[in-house]
Amino acid sequence: MNSVVESNAELKIKFQKQQMMVVNSVSMEIAKIIDFLYQERVIDDEDMRRLHAQGDPQQQCRNLLGLLHTSRHPQAFVQMYRAMKEEPRLELLVELIDEFSVHVLQEQRYLSDPTGKREA
């Protein structure tokens, strides 16, 4: 189970660092992704209705990502990633997420830390 938590944590970072690209790409398929996340019980009835009620797909995507970032669901981003993999139009975005290195982010944090200390 620890690897699932790590995968979710890594995906959370990847989605955050690629927010603009995700919002621009996923908005075409946002209704399907919302339905998938509801089906998998990542979001509840109220969240689903509120997201579907918004007219702008990009705003729906932004709000969905905001929900996922504050979610306590242990696989929120794993399930979002799964939903995206189901959509052929999102293949390039999924590939970019796969290639994005979390380790590079960790090094960037180290280099930008004024104390020069690495987190243990």
Image (cartoon, rainbow, N blue to C red):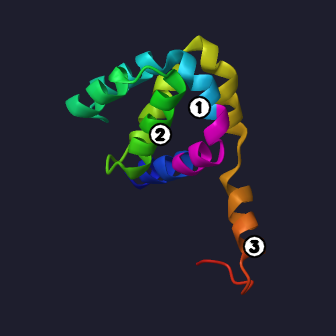
State if disc 1 and disc 2 touch (CB < 8 Å). Answer: yes
Which label sits on residue 93?
none
Label 2 sits on residue = 65
Which element type, helix, strand or loop, lies under badge 1? helix
Which numbered disc, 3 or 1, marks the residue that appears first in the sequence?
Answer: 1
User: Quick check: is 97 in the magenta stretch?
Assistant: no
- The amino acid type of the residue labelled 2 equals Leu
Which element type, helix, strand or loop, lies under badge 2? helix
Residue at figure coordinates x 50%, y 36% from the top left:
62
- The amino acid type of the residue labelled 3 equals Ser
Q: Is residue 27 left or right of residue 101?
A: left
Residue at the farthest left position: 45
Residue at figure coordinates x 74%, y 83% from the top left:
114
Of residues 24 and 110, the one drawn nearer to the viewer in this rendering: 24
User: Quick check: is 14 in the magenta stretch?
Assistant: yes
Q: Is residue 1 above or below residue 44?
A: below
Residue at figure coordinates x 60%, y 12% from the top left:
88
Residue 40 visible in the picture: no
Label 1 sits on residue = 23
Label 3 sits on residue = 112
Mark 3 vs mark 1: give the one in front. Answer: 1
